[in-house]
Image (cartoon, rainbow, N blue to C red):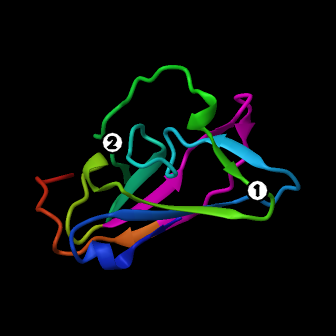
Amino acid sequence: MEVDSSMLIEGRVVLNSTIHNRGLGTLVFLPWGSPFESSVTAPFLKVKVRKVNGLYDVPYEGMLVKRRAPQAEDFLELEAGSSYKRSLDITKSYTFCPGQTYILEYQGPLYSLDFTELLVSGEIVEFSTHEAFPPCGQTE
């Protein structure tokens, strides 16, 4: 995962995520509630803001989607040795204030076709917001 720095200047937090299939077979996974979906539908990230006196959780404010049971066409297939990339705007899912430092961590999980939880190693992403973000209320 990485945050698109050019979008920060516009007051947007766009997350660029890549999943690599390092296995020998095809990886089939459900993108729902992950950075590989077309919109944010669940709190798949742990977001913290760095303040002088510590780190504070930033609550999820995005939509929550209730869905039918997934069908075969809802899953993505990733051949062995290949990668899948997706950009996702998370700006409206959390409150991002101007001139702050944020830390994002993927909290998953991803599920396979048989609903086995897939091991996903995510990195922690740290970035600072630009002054283009809307002002936020006073915080502690």
Q: Residue at x 28, y 71 (%)?
A: 129
Viewer-closest of 79 and 59: 79
Circles 1, 2 touching at the beta carbon (< 8 Å): no
Measured as percent of width and height from the top left, residue 116 is found at 74, 32
Measured as percent of width and height from the top left, residue 89 is found at 34, 58
User: 10 Å neighbourhood of mark 1: few (<14), some, or many (≥20)?
Assistant: some
Disc nearest the viewer among 1 and 2: 1
User: 10 Å neighbourhood of mark 2: few (<14), some, or many (≥20)?
Assistant: some
Q: Left or right: 107 with respect to 127? A: right
- Single out the residue that lies furthest toward the top: 68
Is 21 colored magenta in this rendering?
no
- Single out the residue that lies furthest toward the front: 73
Q: Left or right: 25 with respect to 55? A: right
How far apart are the two marked residues, 1 and 2, measured between alpha carbons? 35 Å
Q: Which residue is mark 2?
A: 59
Q: Quadrant of residue 74?
A: top right
Q: Residue at x 41, y 23 (%)?
A: 66
Measured as percent of width and height from the top left, residue 48 is found at 39, 54
- Note whether 82 is above or below 29 in the view shown: below
- Give the extent of the magenta segment: 101-125
Measured as percent of width and height from the top left, residue 115 is found at 70, 29
Q: Residue at x 44, y 23 (%)?
A: 67
Describe the element under mark 1 as helix, strand or loop.
loop
Q: Earlier in the sequence, mark 1 or mark 2?
A: 2
- Note whether 121 is above or below 67 in the view shown: below
Q: Quadrant of residue 51?
A: bottom left
Q: Amino acid at mark 1?
A: Glu
Q: Which residue is mark 1?
A: 79
Q: Amino acid at mark 2?
A: Pro
Is 115 colored magenta in this rendering?
yes
Q: Residue at x 80, y 60 (%)?
A: 22
Describe the element under mark 2 as helix, strand or loop.
loop
